[in-house]
Image (tube, grey):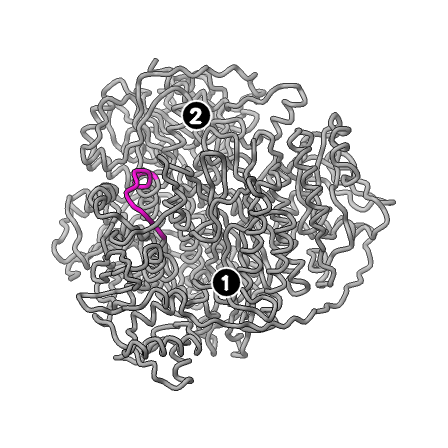
Amino acid sequence: MAGGNGREKKKPQRQATERAPDAPVQVGAKALIMSGYGINSEMETQEALARAGMGSDIVHSNDLIAGRKTLSGYRLLVFPGGFSYGDDTGAGNAYANRVRNNLWGDLEKFLDGDNLVLGICNGFQILANLGLVPAFDKKYTREIALMPNRKGVLECRFVTIKPAADNLWTRGIERISCPVSHGEGNFYCSPDTLQRLKDQKMITFRYCRDDMSPADGEYPHNPNGSVEDIAGITSEDGKVLGLMPHPERAMEFVNLYDWPYQKEMMKRKGIEPPQESLNMQFFKNITRYFQ
Amino acid sequence: MDSFIHRIEVHYKSDPRLQSRSDRIRSLGFPLSELHLIDIYTIATGSRDFSKDELAQIGAQLINPVVQEYTIDTATTADFDYAIEVGFLPGVTDNVGTTAKQTIEDFFSFRFLDGESVTSSQLFFVRGALSPDSVQELASTLANPLVNRVHIRTRREYGSRGMDPVVPSVHLNEIPTAETVDLDLDDANLARLGKEGIPDAATGQRRGPLALDLAQLHTIRNYFKKKGRKPTDVELESLAQTWSEHCKHTIFASAMDDDIPQGLYKSCIQAATNKIRKEKGKKDICVSVFSDNSGAIIFDETYLVTHKVETHNSPSALDPFGGALTGIVGVNRDTIGFGLGAKPCLNYYGYCVGDPDTDPKLFRGKNRLNPILSPRQILDGVVRGVGVGGNCSGIATPQGWCCFHDRYTGKPLVFAGTVGVMPREHKGRKLSEKRAKAGDLIVMVGGRVGKDGIHGATFSSEPLDPASPVTAVQIGDPITQKKLSDVIVKEARDPGLYRSITDNGAGGLSCSVAEMAKECNGCHVALDKVPLKYPGMAPWEIWISESQERMTLAIPKENLNAFLDLVQRREVEATVIGTFTDTGKCVVECHGDVVMDVDLDFLHDGLPKKHLKTTFTQKTYPEPDPACPARLDETLLSLLQRKNICSKEFISIQYDHTVQGGHVLGPVQGKGRVQAAASLTKVVPGSKKGVGLSQGLFPSYSEIDPYRMAAAGIDTAIRGLIAIGIPLDQIALLDNFCWCSSDNPERLGQLKRAAQGCYDVATAFGTPFISGKDSMFNDFSGFDAKSNPVKISVPPTLLISSIGIHPDVISAVSMDAKFEGDLIYVIGETSEELGGSEYFASLGSTGNTVPALDAGKAKARYRRLTDAIGKELVASAHPVSHGGLAVALAKVAIAGRIGMDITIPSGMRPDYYLFSESLSRFVVTVSPANQKAFEKIASTDAVLLGQLSGRSLRVAAQKNLIDIPVDDLENAYKLPFRGY
């Protein structure tokens, strides 16, 4: 199991040598990015996918409900970040209700196909309330919760996460340094569910320290109090990923928190700073799946 | 109507919020031992009831069963001493209730009828050694009496039945028609009408201030005499809105003394911009200045960016959360309402409040009636309000500031700004231009109209006093506005579905429609078509209501169906409420009766000209003469803990500053996370350019020298952007004057000097003003605990905000020290300028020598630094500001978590040298490899102070003055707001 268990004390690793990121490959498969009702990260998510080589359409949930647009034909469904319904009745809950009450048949069909679903931040909260993760035995019941942060307020800061499983989403990723920005990202589930998530290697990303050692629940490395530093999990079949941090907000080197420091260091070593950040590997993994 | 009422109570099995909430309540001094929070939904219907099973289905939709449980019509049980329920008063926007209502409607495929409702409230169970009085006091920190209802029960009263279900419903006196108003009154009664409002025919109660003075009322009386009739209340209220100080800026527009016949705005602000634009010629960066809802400058060949900063002071004094939220979502609409609609991309904030560690007991009424909120409550509320507004709207908030002064205790100042971005053209159509045509339909889009926000414009034109109207408070709903913003900017704009658009802000429809009517010379409105939140509103109320989340559009008839179809699919309400005309008149009818018929000329330009007289008395304060301490370690540590200097990072991190993916230089920088003076953000994906924001304000200089105060503000606002690498010729400014007692010639004298400072300094730098706003009566008149009258006026406050375009963000410079061995320079001269400084304030003094600006020298210096940064010779740069050089050095060291070895030049008292606030200075660090190249560019203007080294800040003159571990500096810097 790559990444290891957050409870096990591991020797901190030095930052891995920077591997060259994949070159973008244009794929024919298309993504549908949900919008509406306060979802707000659809445009940067579209940009990230485009830079990784995947075209997409931003579609308002009402256009799907009214049948003006349909899920069929798309290979990736994205619930982007945002504040759907202002987090009223629980983050992601009202939007999930809307999808479940109106689009469930189409969604189930989509999940049965060879397709991927990604939920980032508010999107993860929506997936959790829809039961799309963890979806043990293809049962879409709510098994996890993203509760209010331990500190009780929204917190926007850069975090480091590292893969905790070796799967299609994490291929070639050593770490992701990107912002979290949420008021309700405190991952919680029952001990039984947690055991099953671990046994089946569904915990995909964990918060860690700068030096890649486990955050061990310590603020601010683990920014919200998530159990076992969990930042993202997949569904049992691995095709649905829910992730709290926002890699799409740090696509470029200059988007990183410490880029001025990194740049100054590179400059003095005679290295040209890169344009793209290593976080783009996350999106390239998605396009690679459809190659 | 409400025959069936059900109450669903939701609680966490193990509540993650309790620790932080309990800590907060304890930090306010309440001995709390246990706390529980319960979310309540009250469903009230008349047409149908819900069965037990159906209520269980509703309950299931409102929780996550992994962590939450619900009860239906059963009181939640827990160990507690008191139960405090906080809900909304009737008519106040209840966003959570509205969302729950939509979920229920969706699930059962039915619609609630008018009068049926889902409302939310929160129940707090508290345990601890609390007296009934302290429970009341605790409740008052959880609720605001202007917008909240509070019910308290002891454990015994709560029993097994719990709290009573409460269904807020609005009870209105039916006033279906417009009334005429008799202006044939003697001057005393006429003045009273202007000050207190039109008397209600039935009750005699005054409706709230018109804020019209006698001269204005005489003009109105004469106008209607000529028409041979009396004005209606709609006409009078409408004129009051349009002529208000808030809308017409009469003080800035009026002739002043003998030397400013055109008024301060035209002579000082607009004239500066005109002169600069002319001088810059082809290099002019302005696209649209002063004429639209925001100002705009060129971003690149394809895009423009807009900026606007508003204040929302009076509402925030009464309801900090609601006031600030409304402020930020309101200024977002100034972006959406710019040209044909710019996309809001960055929010910006500024808070002037009293020291949150003080709790002065002040009251709006005698006998301890109507207490004002404490500075802590105001700060908490406004911080949260702007946060909720920006976060829910998906707009990044990278830049902001706080300023603390005891004279903001009576009335806080809340600044809220928004930067927008839009293409300059779409298919050959300039998107920054708009014009309604006669025959276009007037369409109101967004939220419905209620009684909220009535008399906002006229209320903010008057000082806060006991009669401040309660309906002036509005609460915004960012999600409703987000839906509106998305459909306008992302879908309706580019196909050209509408010809003009403006925001419904101050004055509501009366101002937005009449303003747009200028574009075609007339309008005809049917008020009965306006969708209302609840029935029973009088025509004048509908016309001037400031209910939020609304825009007014001019839509050609042939586009109406396409537009209505689009917005309906986005669940955004749009209603045709009239037609634009070319009759030269503003005509309003209601159910077929004409209730307003006024010439547009009179409405917009009929207000009588004023000629203001000013006086100015140079104030002299005792000059402090402290002995220079032998060591300055303690002085520096105590300055770092001053509220105006220390870290307010708790605000920066609760505001999303990364959404839209453009973060380059954020609100906190470096390993040590220090709040920077400027931020930098990419707003166009794929472009290497970025938008920088900074600001300057020095209210502590105002009473000493308002001219220099303005100069310091402009210099500092510009300097913040220079430090990150933005060239001077890419910088534009915004002005926000927040004055006090502006009917006092002395205050006007200060205003005049500040405005003249603005002209002189802006033209010297060549940085145009592109937008501005003023708020002239920031005074509190009330009583202390012993009923002695108290008046507290804010210090004259001028906020200069700056916006600049960075040519290539990869060359931008952050503030944090980078590597040991790097050289430390101060650029710019230091003089003994400590009047109004933080150092003198820490000694309890004011002094007199406010920093002076030599704009010519500064300009040359800024060009050289831009050159050095462009050549990538500078590793870090930080402007010297509050607290002087020592504080700037400490911040750079903390941010980089690296020590410094500094030797300061002798010749001046070390404390004065280190803490003087002389303008136009920077601290920069430079790699030794770049020393030669840097010094060649910077020349003698840069003084080498020392080197980055070790883990302590060490400063010496002839002898050691400071030697403090950087960790200790960081602790001091972050101490005051730890726990917020």
Along the viewing direction, whichever of B560 and A189 lies nearer the viewer: B560
- Badge 2 element: strand
Up-down relation of residue B198 to residue A233 (above or below): below
The answer to whether residue B711 of the structure is visible from this angle is yes
Q: Residue furthest bottom?
A: B186
- Residue type at the position of mark 1: Ser
Label at residue B616: none
In magenta, the rendered stretch is B490-502
The answer to whether residue B152 of the structure is visible from this angle is no
Would residue B573 appear left or right of B27 to someone viewing this image?
left
Label at residue A205: 2
Question: Which quadrant does the N terminus of chain B fall into?
Answer: bottom left
Q: Residues within 10 Å of mark 2 (few under 14, many from 20)?
A: many
Label at residue B775: 1
Q: Chain of mark 1?
A: B
Up-down relation of residue B768 to residue B215 (above or below): above
